[in-house]
Image (cartoon, rainbow, N blue to C red):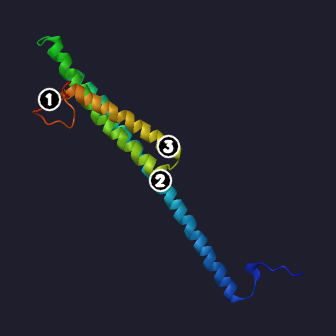
Amino acid sequence: MRVVSDFNHNTDAKRSALLEKSKGCWRLEMLHENMNEFKDIVAYVAYGIEAVGVMVIVIGSVVGTVRLLPQLKTRAISEIYHEYRQVIGRSILLGLEFLIAGDVIRTVIVSHTLTDVAALALMVLVRAFLSLTLTVEIEGKLPWVKRGERGMPKKP
């Protein structure tokens, strides 16, 4: 019984077929490597966007605190407290938007598991609820109500 490998076979047709097959495999490997690199880059971008969100919250809190501290001597505490809550609330709202964007990018591009998508849905739901309650707290009205109208629905 004679065993001949494809690499040692004498026909040119088989050699060229194997060469083309190996080129195709090489192309698939390169494509797979490029996709992994792309996913890594997107993951880093998503982490960067989330880091911006955290920085927005921290910087907004620090700036709001520093800006309102000198006013403690000249204004009533209740006025300062209300304004301080608005400044902090706005920085949290903006930071939450960046955090949600980073989560969406990372989950959609990088990981496609059902667990990750469910976790993303829960995080977006919680953050959207926080955004809604902070908007009502800061502006005194629901986000979809026009400026001149009352923000809260009338009780029957």
Residue 145 position, x and y percent, is 17, 36
Residue linked to disc 3? 116
Quadrant housing residue 84:
top left
How far apart, in angstroms, are the residues tagged by discs 1 and 3?
Answer: 39 Å
Residue 43 position, x and y percent, is 45, 48
Q: Amino acid at mark 3?
A: Asp
User: Circle 1: is it few (<14), some (14-19), or many (20+) Cα within 10 Å?
Assistant: few
Residue 131 position, x and y percent, is 30, 33
Circle nearer the N terminus (2, 3)? 2
Q: Secondary structure at mark 2?
A: helix
**Residue 138 position (above or below residue 39):** above
Quadrant housing residue 88:
top left
Residue at the extreme front of the image, as rendered: 156
User: Circle 2: is it few (<14), some (14-19), or many (20+) Cα within 10 Å?
Assistant: some
Residue linked to disc 2? 39
Which of label 1 and label 3 is nearer to you? 1
Q: Along the line of sight, which residue is nearer the eye, 79 or 6?
A: 79
Q: Along the line of sight, which residue is nearer the eye, 10 or 100?
A: 100
Query: In the image, what residue occupies the spot 68% across and 83% down?
Result: 15
Task: Locate the C terminus and report the quarter of the image it occupies.
Answer: top left
**Along the horizontal axis of the image, is 56 left or right of 44?**
left
Quadrant housing residue 47:
top left
How many numbered badges does the structure rendering display? 3
How far apart, in angstroms, are the residues tagged by discs 1 and 2?
Answer: 47 Å
Residue linked to disc 1? 150
Q: Secondary structure at mark 1?
A: loop
Q: Secondary structure at mark 3?
A: helix
